[in-house]
Image: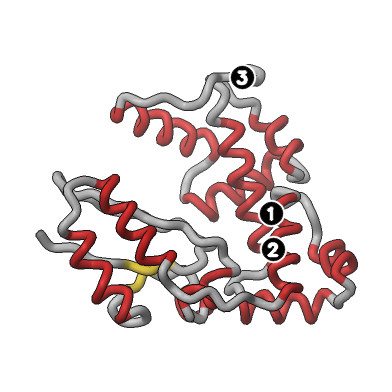
Amino acid sequence: MAGQLTVLGPSTTPHLFWFHPGQEQVAIRLKLEWSRALLGLDPLEHADRSDDASGPLPALARTALPRLLASRDAGEAMQRLSAAVLALDDDRLPAITLRAVELVRRARGAVTMDAVAFHLGTSPRQLRRRMREEVGIGLKGYARVLRFLRVITEADRSEHPAWADLAADAGYADQAHLVRDCRALSGFTPRELFRERRAQLDEEGRSFPAARGKAA
């Protein structure tokens, strides 16, 4: 059975996967700030890219891929991939970078770079430079992704999402800004993405969390 271990860098544009019958995929999503510390990768070199891991991570690919291919199912493959990643070194990032990303994550994207820089006692320019070098994406871009994910996650809990309300709750200026971000990050409008996600789960016989929220 053929297979490939792939590294996906920080993404700011849609990334589509094409499957053939019988193919399966398992993946581990690392926090952005750990790509360099845990994997030894320069995040900027892999931004918006999908790369064969045998190039940037030859040791991991050499040891993990045969074990993954010998797995009997996706669950076992996930356990083996997780074990391989956990066995790597974990030199920590500078505290200021870790704290900056965590502040944005806790706010679910509803915070400005100026506010984060002020809280950490540094300048926005210095923080921007360190984020790009050590994480591969700026705080503004990361906050944008988190706001978008917040809206989509909340929409999943409703049969008829109220997009204007969801946009406001996530910190968007208006619904039009949500639509623009959704198109840029997923390639769909919010309604199109919602229908696509529903259709996919219907095909798999699964369901979203219990519906809640207002009708649009």
At label 2, which amino acid type do we have?
Val
Q: In this view, does 129 lie to the left or right of 64?
A: right
Identify the residue shown where x is 75% and y is 58%. 103
Q: Dot 2, crowdedness within 10 Å: few (<14), some or many (≥20)?
A: many
At label 3, which amino acid type do we have?
Arg
Q: Distance between the residues labelled 1 and 3?
A: 24 Å
Location of mark 1 (residue): 105
Q: Which of marks 1 and 3 is nearer the N terminus?
A: 1
Of badges 2 and 3, the one in the foreground is 2
Quarter of the rendering occupied by the N terminus: bottom left
Q: Is residue 130 shown above or below 108?
A: below
Residue 189: x and y in percent read 52, 41
Identify the residue shown where x is 57% and y is 37%. 153
Identify the residue shown where x is 79% and y is 55%. 111
Location of mark 2 (residue): 101
Location of mark 3 (residue): 212
Residue 209: x and y in percent read 51, 25
Identify the residue shown where x is 88% and y is 65%. 119
Residue 206: x and y in percent read 36, 26
Q: Is residue 53 shown above or below 158?
A: below
- Please tell me which residue lies in front, 193 or 60: 60
Q: Is mark 1 on a helix, strand or loop?
A: helix
- Which picture quadrant has residue 134? bottom right
Q: Dot 1, crowdedness within 10 Å: few (<14), some or many (≥20)?
A: some
- Which picture quadrant has residue 61? bottom left
Residue 143: x and y in percent read 68, 57
Q: Dot 3, crowdedness within 10 Å: few (<14), some or many (≥20)?
A: some
At label 1, which amino acid type do we have?
Arg
Are the two marked residues, 2 and 3, in contact with CB atoms closer than 8 angstroms? no
Are the two marked residues, 1 and 2, in contact with CB atoms closer than 8 angstroms? yes
